[in-house]
Image (spheres, rainbow, N blue to C red):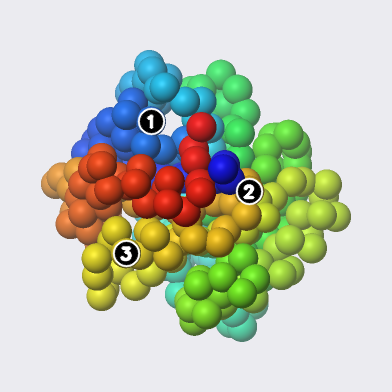
Amino acid sequence: MRRIVLCADDYALSPGVSAGIRELLTAGRLNATSVMTIFPELETEAKALLSVRSPIPFQIGLHATLTGGFRPLSATPIPSPDGHLPMSRETWPPFGFLRISGTRVKAEVSAQLKNFIRVFGRAPDYVDGHQHVQLMPGVRVPFLAAVKELAPNAWVRQCAPARWSDEFLNAKSRFLGFLSLGFRSRARRANLAFNPAFSGAYDYDRPSDFGASFARFVRGIPEGSVIMCHPGHPDDVLRTRDILTDQREKEFSFFISGEMPRIMAEAGATLA
């Protein structure tokens, strides 16, 4: 059985999202969650997460947030009149590279890491990025520098699919894989560990049978790979902060169901 990391992103984005993730952890249906540390509810949500009792060990990581239009803790990677974080597209190459301030990126990632350490009492097990921002040219070097400085034993998330897997044939996955080439190279130079492969990306605007998608995500990925997911219960707070709402409930319903362990077993994969 191949042990994989099934990671729920966006913990602390809203009370409903956090509650759904805790339910899945308690049921042993996840073994990792990535925490956003920029919102005022962080301390309450962190306390609740630390109280979770799961039948399997799970990791807690930092979901470094440099995009999304939110208010940062310290600085925006791209200066803006209102002082809010840029939208994801503004960081994309080639023009994002020219706009991004590496000094500001490191300052904000460092501030979010320090906030994580403050509320959890330790460094994160791993560090990834909201909307895959850690992969972007202009972000990757200062991002990794901040991790190396404040969480040197953490691993970082790269987003390349396993070679010749089903996900390798997906255009979105190949794009993330291309961006991950430079990220992995820089992580090696910094002597930071990273996951061997990644899956879980799909078009949220064109949702299909999530069970069929998950079966594709888990098929053929090697030991230690990461599958990203976004389960949770939509609430009013979420609707003011993110456009991904009802699909989170669909993912939650799949993961809490009996279909999820059946697909895992058929694929020869385990979280334990």
Local SS, label 2: loop
Q: Which residue is mark 1?
A: 28
Identify which amino acid the numbered label 3 is placed on.
Ala
The residue carrying pointer 2 sits among few (fewer than 14), some (14 to 19) or many (20 or more) residues within 10 Å by Cα, namely some
The residue carrying pointer 3 sits among few (fewer than 14), some (14 to 19) or many (20 or more) residues within 10 Å by Cα, namely few
Q: Which mark is residue 212?
A: 3
Distance from the alpha carbon under mark 1 to that under mark 3: 21 Å
Does any portion of residue 85 appear in the rendered image?
A: yes
Distance from the alpha carbon under mark 1 to that under mark 2: 19 Å
Q: Is residue 252 left or right of residue 90?
A: left
Residue visible at 25% across and 75% down?
Answer: 206
Distance from the alpha carbon under mark 2 to that under mark 3: 21 Å
Precedes in sequence: disc 1 or disc 3: 1
Identify which amino acid the numbered label 2 is placed on.
Glu
Residue situated in front as seen by the camera: 18 or 136: 18
Q: Is residue 8 left or right of residue 185?
A: left
Identify which amino acid the numbered label 1 is placed on.
Gly
Whole-percent x, y for residue 29 in the image? 37, 37
Q: Is residue 104 above or below residue 173?
A: above
Precedes in sequence: disc 2 or disc 3: 3
Q: Is residue 120 left or right of residue 102?
A: left
Whole-percent x, y for residue 104 in the image? 62, 55
Quarter holding the N terminus is top right
Local SS, label 1: loop
Q: Which residue is mark 2?
A: 223
Residue visible at 68% across and 37% down?
Answer: 154
Q: Which mark is residue 46?
A: none
